[in-house]
Image: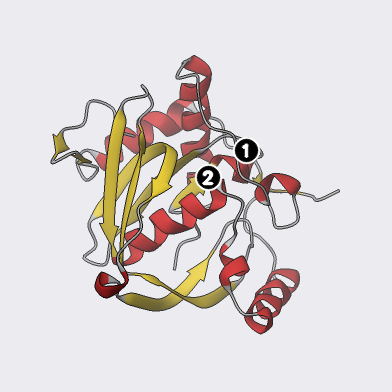
Amino acid sequence: MAQQETDDQTINDGFVVDTEDCEARELAHRERGTARPITVVGNPVLHKECKDVTEFDAELAQLIDDMFASQKAAEGVGLAANQIGVDLKVFVYDCPDDEGVRHTGVVINPVLQEIPAELRVLDESNEGCLSVPTAYAELARPDYAEVHGQDAQGDPIKVRGTGYFARCLQHETDHLYGYLYIDRLSKRDRKDALRQMEEGTPRYETVPNA
């Protein structure tokens, strides 16, 4: 997701504590990783459900490192694997919530939990995406999100967030099931977002669509 890891982390009520040592953990991933160019809307890998991760190995660890490096290079707050062309259900994040608290981590094989309608409060804020560079649009999403998945070792984890961070969790999970945020817009707003992208110039390297 555009701006406006769970290594040895403590678990609290089954939820990852992702607010501690964020700077050190993000930097460690990034220093081991290599930034890759970002895929953009129209690239087939963005428009289909990604494959489940079944091997929790050194190759996956390297992918996570590369994703953190790519996210930083593009100045994003969240990144899904298919945004660097990898067909696997992995996303990373380094994102503040509405209180300014930083959250940093990785979720593998994420599943977004359904919020009962009577508890759902919508937040109508602007949203952007590294795969739709330079474009923004207002999109209503629940102001609370809870994602269940696995960490880099394959152990089950849960991540929850409010406000901007909740938007990030929903946005990145959407990516891994083949949805961009513009797919949730009206036809008019989607067309406007694509126009913004066409008229803008990305500040990071992207993969040209064939």
- The tag on residue 80 is 2
Most extreme residue toward the right is 210
Q: How many marks?
A: 2
* Occupied quadrant, residue 156: top left
Relative placement, left or right, of 209 versus 114 is right
Disc 2/disc 1 C-alpha distance (Å): 12 Å
Question: Is label 2 in a helix, a strand or a loop?
Answer: strand
- Percent coordinates x, y for residue 13 in the rendering: 13, 41
For disc 1, the marked residue is 36
Question: Is label 1 in a helix, a strand or a loop?
Answer: loop
Q: Residues within 10 Å of mark 2 (few under 14, many from 20)?
A: many
Please determine whether, in this image, residue 71 is positioned above or below residue 165.
above
Task: Identify the amino acid type marked 2.
Answer: Ala
Please determine whether, in this image, residue 24 is positioned above or below residue 169.
above
- Percent coordinates x, y for residue 53 in the rendering: 51, 28
- Percent coordinates x, y for residue 208 in the rendering: 79, 50
Contact (Cβ within 8 Å) of mark 2 with mark 1: no
> Which of the two discs, 2 and 1, sits closer to the camera?
2
Q: Residue at x 22, y 57 (%)?
A: 101
Q: Residue at x 47, y 31 (%)?
A: 64
Relative placement, left or right, of 181 versus 208 is left
Relative placement, left or right, of 98 versus 88 is left
Task: Identify the amino acid type marked 1.
Answer: Arg
Q: Residues within 10 Å of mark 1 (few under 14, many from 20)?
A: many
Q: Which of the two residues, 47 or 29, is positioned nearer the viewer here?
A: 47
